[in-house]
Amino acid sequence: MYKISVIVPCYNQAVFLDDCVNSLINQTYSNWECILVNDGSTDNTEEKALEWQSKDNRIKYIKKTNGGLSSARNTGIRNVTGDFVQFLDCDDFLYKEKFEKSVQKIKNPTNTIVITDFQRFDNTTKTVLPPHCILEEKYFNQKEILLKWDNPFSIPIHCALFSRDIVEKYRFNEELKAKEDWIFWLQAYGDKPETFFIKEYLLAYRMSSAGMTNNEFFMYENKTKAIEKLDQVISDKDLLRTFYKENLLSAMNENFQLMERIKLLGYKRTMKYKINKILKLLHLKNNK
């Protein structure tokens, strides 16, 4: 029976930790360990994590200075003892059959990825929503992940169960504060892993207005940094040239649309000025 190591980075989200860990406790598959990595939290994360550790010997607690999400995940990777690795952010949660149904698909304990479908959870309304994209098997290769990431799809890292050799070989780029998942997926699929897809909702991705992914400038800045690293990740240089060409055309189109919006804004301001000037003149005439 394969052992699953669950890596849970925690940073000031103690309010969600019980939901996260309970989703592990409730799994129908019991051969797992959970590594809670406290990435320098200033809330009561440590108190809750220690409480869980005392309740279940499958739960381990590690405390470190703040280094970011990738750093926390990598700390977890260095401490796994399982055959497969499940990444799970502190504010997300799994459905109870995620592990059981994933393990049933596994044929080989190396260079293997099992991907399940996901739903979103609106933290404000406490309702479950459809996923932000439709996952299909045709996307699970390096070419599609490079050329079509974010449009029309992306794969939340929590959807996957990775064989341990993959995560120990690549880990997460700690220079990136976003788009680190994209780079990780590209690296993993550079080795053409055997992939199994379970077209069933087996986890929930919590939506929050305070999340990093809602900061457009932050995401753009880190995407630029990630693109600079592609030469080290993609060995197929023809594929890389295709990506750069498509990205250039996309950037040019975005710039054109931005220029059009700026022109329209300038036009609106000019018209507003002229209308106000006419209204002022009319007001003066009426007062005479």
Image: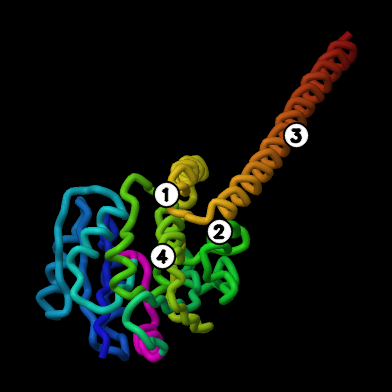
Report if residue 94 lies within the magenta region.
yes
Q: Estimate how packed mark 3 is, as few (under 14), some (14 to 19) or many (20 or more) residues with alpha carbons within 10 Å.
A: few
Say what secondary structure mark 1 lies in: helix
Residue designated by label 2: 149
Q: Nearer the viewer, mark 2 or mark 4?
A: 4
Disc 1 to disc 4, how far (Cα)?
A: 13 Å
Considering depth in this image, is 48 or 240 the residue closer to the camera?
240
Is residue 91 found inside the magenta-colored segment of the image? yes
> What secondary structure is marked by label 3?
helix
Instruction: Name the quarter where the N terminus is drawn.
Output: bottom left
Give the distance between the C-alpha atoms of the residues marked 2 and 1, in whole angstroms: 18 Å
Q: Secondary structure at mark 4?
A: helix
Q: Earlier in the sequence, mark 3 or mark 2?
A: 2
The residue that disc 3 covers is 260
Is tag 2's residue or tag 4's residue first in the polypeptide sequence?
2
Evaluate whether residue 216 shows in this view: yes
Q: Which residue is mark 4?
A: 188
Identify the mark nearer the N-term, 4 or 3.
4
Residue 232 is tagged as 1
At 58% from the left edge and 55% from the top edge, which residue is drawn? Answer: 239
Q: Earlier in the sequence, mark 1 or mark 4?
A: 4
Residue 97 in sight: no
In the orientation shown, which residue stands out farthest toward the left?
54
The image shows residue 165, relative to residue 288, as above or below, that is below
Q: Is residue 245 left or right of residue 230?
A: right
Residue 75 place in picture, x, y as percent: 21, 59
Residue in the image at 68% along x and 38% along y: 252
SS state under label 2:
loop
Residue stretch in magenta:
89-104
Q: CA distance from mark 4 to mark 3?
A: 40 Å
Query: N-terminal of the two: label 1 or label 3?
Result: 1
